[in-house]
Image (cartoon, rainbow, N blue to C red):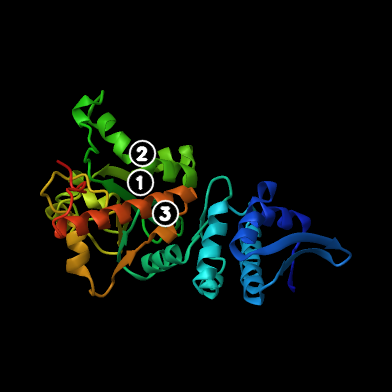
Amino acid sequence: MEKRTVKMDSAEITARVFGAFDKNVALVEKAFSVIVRNRSGEDGDAVVIEGEKAHDVEDAEQVVRQMRLVARQGDVVPEQSVRYLIDMTRAGQGETVASMGDDCISVTVRGKPIKAKTVGQKQYVDAIRKNTVTFGVGPAGTGKTYLAVAMAVKALRDKQVSRIILTRPAIEAGERLGFLPGDLQSKIDPYLRPLYDALFEMMGPENYHSCLEKQTIEIAPLAYMRGRTLDDSFIILDEAQNATPEQMKMFLTRLGFNSKAVITGDLTQTDLPRGTKSGLGAAVKILGGIEDIAIHHFTDKDVVRHHLVQKIIQAYEKFERESRDGAETGGKKYYRKDKK
């Protein structure tokens, strides 16, 4: 029987590592066929890991050590984080996770630190820091928009820029703007709600509304960007898969001096009319390799929502692969991604 011990800072840290009803520990035990238990003594709290196979015990120990680092940030370790740590360790990338460090991007109004939770997110944040234009392309739940807004708020607080500009194409996902009540602003608001939510969490409603009145923060549909030059700004184009190639070119040429732009989108969730190409897909092909422009691709492993979101994404990808293969070989008629 192999045995490893990981010392804990306190009983509180141990409780955060174990999670509610010891769910986190149960995931580790199941993944590596080990037994994990808490031990308290004169030398403090510790977690003891035992198992038949040495490499399984070593991997479990590495995961527990990473969980301890997450617990030190002040919260119970989320179940999704445990699953991610397990997957990365199984893939032999545990050291990569350990190298992420303790990089705090910003802090919410409630004092909660905002940090990259996956290696992919860390690479995305580093790309935004180093480049003038950064594309974040990937599935839902990977933190593309949230982290971009966090970086924008940090840049504003640090006086690196004088304003934040957030924009999205006002494209309906199967619905029509005309059916919504109110004036144009009221019709547009639902499309910009994810951006409002992120700003509220990081700045608080009062500070946000104050910045909005002073035009330090501007939120507008993509069409409103035409004819402008955006200097000294942090600009975020969200849901860029719904921009046409012409709109994307228009947006990218708005960039002014001392500005930074982040473009986010998911090429599998395009709401453009059938036959219309996505400006995001075209831009990724055209601009790849240009200095000071970074293109970061997220994967399903970067999903930080409920673990079922990751499985849903994988299931859809598999189904669409099989659909394409079937169509190419003259098989059954499958569901098409593009809308009718």
The residue tagged 2 is 193
Residue 326, position in %: x, y? 20, 56
Q: Quadrant of the C terminus?
A: top left
Q: Nearer the viewer, residue 225 or 231?
A: 225
User: Is residue 267 shown to the viewer in this render?
Assistant: no
Residue 136, position in %: x, y? 33, 60
15 relative to 85, above or below: above
User: Is residue 36 shown to the viewer in this render?
Assistant: yes
Question: Which residue reaches farthest front?
Answer: 331
Q: Which mark is residue 329?
A: none
> Considering the numbered disc 2 on the image, is that residue within a helix, a strand or a loop?
helix
194 relative to 102, above or below: above
Could you tell whether 122 is left or right of 188 in the image?
right
The residue tagged 1 is 217
Name the N-terminal-most of marks 1 and 2.
Answer: 2
Q: Nearer the viewer, residue 294 or 271?
A: 271
Quadrant position of residue 289: bottom left
